[in-house]
Amino acid sequence: MPELQLAPYAVSVSARGRKIAEPAPSARSEFQRDRDRIIHSGAFRRLEYKTQVFVNHEGDLFRTRLTHSIEVAQIGRSIARRLALNEDLVEAISLAHDLGHTPFGHAGQEELNACMKDYGGFEHNLQSLRVVDVLEERYAEFDGLNLCFETREGILKHCSQENAAQLGEVGERFLNNHRPSLEAQLANLADEIAYNNHDVDDGLRSGLVTLEQLATVRLFSEHLDEVRTSYPDLSERRVVHETVRRMIGTLVTDLIEQTELNIQTQAPQSVDDVRVAPPLVAFSEGMRELNRELKSFLRTQLYRHYRVMRMSAKSQRIISDLFHAFTDDPRLLPPQFAPTEESKRARAVADYIAGMTDRYAIREHRRIFAIEDL
């Protein structure tokens, strides 16, 4: 099969390269090298035991950060091929975008951010960049993974002006009100497609939401009705899979069509044109409204379900207890994570906690606070 010809506004090569210059790879592209470094990193492996919505020990079939990242990469690559964008770059960004997530999902991030309020705060996008720039220790000649600029830029989806000013060239677009590459824009929306629809699947699997409740959500009900009409004797589990599959297909198709229309309207001829244009990878207005309705349902019926809230409260207590124990007495930290300077103590503790898996954080909490685990 011949190599797909990239569009003129796609990222074909890394214009700004790596922070530390390296010889070009001989048997793969620069972005394939980035993808491979991400897959072989310790932070990527730990995603297997970091939660999406449900804490890792609550069930073997629920999404983890690892399975979610793989699903984002699959959706992103499929759309990138249709739009003649760089699939390898989309895949690298997709696989790396959650590397900085704390244990216990958003509850863990919120609590760690609260703990760090006097020390610069905590944000998982910034932490993902910190992982690939600094924290991974695999190579002799540099810290981190030394990824290409375009991959690093795509990982950093959001950033305050204050933080952007401290990040050098990778933060410039936030200061200049510019956009990242189309590949980065695509990975961001592939992430949204994946987590919305797979949270529907996990919510139904858990029993926290029902088909009857979801039938009030237009994006879901349209496809549910189609499936039940076409397959009246299908088991409920397969009805759910078929409905979610069709939802993803509808979102992907809408995203492709609207993005093609936006590109035709703006007519970018280069990556630089993309950077100064309005966001080009987008859903139609009608689909954005349907997506907002789905998000609102998930927020009220799943993420704020009392069982999820109970686990979130426990998770936040674990994060808070660990943070304060380690900052109050850094001698409790494993030696390799101990801060080298007093002024960097809180950030070193945050790095250690953010790198934990769900089950490791639970065990570490027991080791610190449970008498029987002495």
Image: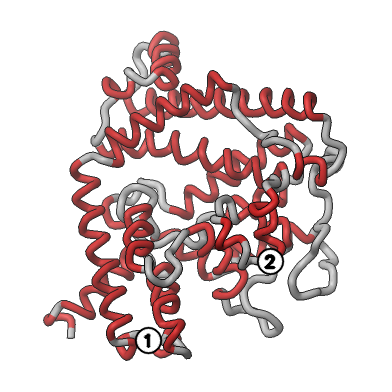
What residue do we see at 43% from left, 14% from top? 222
Check disc 1: other Cα within 10 Å, few if <14, some if 14-19, many if 20+: few
For the C terminus, the quadrant is bottom left
- Tell me which colouring the rendered structure shows: secondary structure
Whether residue 344 is visible to the viewer of this picture, yes or no, is yes
Instruction: Please give left or right for residue 285 compared with residue 237 in the image.
Output: right
Q: Is residue 17 left or right of residue 345?
A: right
Q: Residues within 10 Å of mark 2 (few under 14, many from 20)?
A: few
Q: Residue at x 36, y 31 (%)?
A: 296
- 356 or 228, nearer to the observer: 356
Disc assigned to residue 148: none
Residue 5 appears anywhere in the view = no
Q: Is residue 352 above or below residue 183?
A: below
**On the picture, is 144 further left or further right than 304?**
right
**Quarter placement of the N terminus:** top right
Disc 1 secondary structure class: loop
Dividing the picture into quadrants, the one containing residue 320 is bottom left
Residue at image location 51% in from the left, 39% down from the top:
192
The image shows a total of numbered marks equal to: 2
Q: CA distance from mark 1 to mark 2?
A: 32 Å
Residue occupied by mark 1: 334
Residue type, mark 1 in image: Pro
Question: Looking at this rendering, what residue extends furthest in the left direction?
Answer: 372
**Residue shown at 44% from the left, 34% from the top:** 197
Quickly name the residue at label 2.
168
Instruction: Decide: is 164 above or below 322.
Output: above
Q: Give the residue type at disc 2.
A: Gly
